[in-house]
Image (spheres, helix red, strand yellow):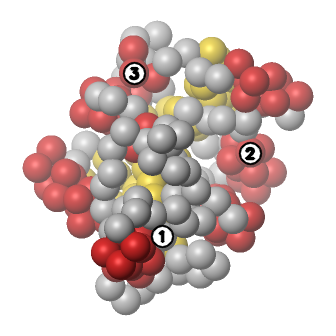
């Protein structure tokens, strides 16, 4: 992912989250998003991460982080313990999406879900004309080393929310450098959704 796209994602999430909110970031990586939220909104945040290397970076950055596998659930957290639960660029990497999303909706009043749009036009073109799994700025991995186990589009996620009766409160469609307002399922590289039960 390019720095510009990451900056646009962080800016978008910062615009969603309210001041002094309680935030749980699932699959927080090295904590850059939580660090940005602490700076822009003074959140009380913590992360859950599986990678020990990423956990060490969180600690170096002063981020409260727990070593854990989000696929095993969030049983240690009571219902609505957080104002926001964030799953930014992690949903497509979990095997049991339903369970993780249900748990996020249980412990968070609202959930922010960000994911790469696998139906992005350049991905479609590369697959169609070159016959290869696409590698783009938002999908920088080759087929054999990708952490992604689910390949979804914006249209797929909207359908998932309808099926599961998840309320979409807001949605943002991101290009490589700016927001996309026209045919997002085709032209957006990433999407960020604010959802609730």
The label shown at residue 71 is: 3
Quadrant containing the N terminus in the rendered view: bottom right
Rendered location of residue 99, percent (x, y): 28, 27
Mark 1 surroundings within 10 Å by alpha-carbon count, few (fewer than 14), some (14 through 19), many (20 or more): many
Residue 104 vs residue 152, the one in the foreground:
152
Mark 3 surroundings within 10 Å by alpha-carbon count, few (fewer than 14), some (14 through 19), many (20 or more): some
Q: Is residue 97 visible?
A: yes
Marks 1 and 2: which is nearer the front?
1
Marks 1 and 3: which is nearer the front?
1
Q: What residue did someone put label 1 on?
A: 189
Query: In 3D space, how far apart are the residues under numbered discs 2 and 3 (Cα atoms)?
Result: 22 Å
Quadrant position of residue 164: top left
Marked residue nearer the N-terminal end (1 or 3): 3
User: For the point 48% across and 41% down, which residue is it?
Assistant: 144
Rendered location of residue 110, percent (x, y): 41, 45
Residue 127 vs residue 116, the one in the foreground:
127
Callout 3: SS? helix
Quadrant position of residue 91: top left
Callout 2: SS? helix
Quadrant position of residue 105: top left
In the visual, does 147 lie left or right of 32?
Answer: left
Q: What residue did someone put label 2 on?
A: 32
Q: Is residue 171 visible?
A: no
- Which residue is situated farthest in the right direction here? 60
In the visual, does 86 lie left or right of 183?
Answer: right
Callout 1: SS? loop
Mark 2 surroundings within 10 Å by alpha-carbon count, few (fewer than 14), some (14 through 19), many (20 or more): some
């Amino acid at each position: 992912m390019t720095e510009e796209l990451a900056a646009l994602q962080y800016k978008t999430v910062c615009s969603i989250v309210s001041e002094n909110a309680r935030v749980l970031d699932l699959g927080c990586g090295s904590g850059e998003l939580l660090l940005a939220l602490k700076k822009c909104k003074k959140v009380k945040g913590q992360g859950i991460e599986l990678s020990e290397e990423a956990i060490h970076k969180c600690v170096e950055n002063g981020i409260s982080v727990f070593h854990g596998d989000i696929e095993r659930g969030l049983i240690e957290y009571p219902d609505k313990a957080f104002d926001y639960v964030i799953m930014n660029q992690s949903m497509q990497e979990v095997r049991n999406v339903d369970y993780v999303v249900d748990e996020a909706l249980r412990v968070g009043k609202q959930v922010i879900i960000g994911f790469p749009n696998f139906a992005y036009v350049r991905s479609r073109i590369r697959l169609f004309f070159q016959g290869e799994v696409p590698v783009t700025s938002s999908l920088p991995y080759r087929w054999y080393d990708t952490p992604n186990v689910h390949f979804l589009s914006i249209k797929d996620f909207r359908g998932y929310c309808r099926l599961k009766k998840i309320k979409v409160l807001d949605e943002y469609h991101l290009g490589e450098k700016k927001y996309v307002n026209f045919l997002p399922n085709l032209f957006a590289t990433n999407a960020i959704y604010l959802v609730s039960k």
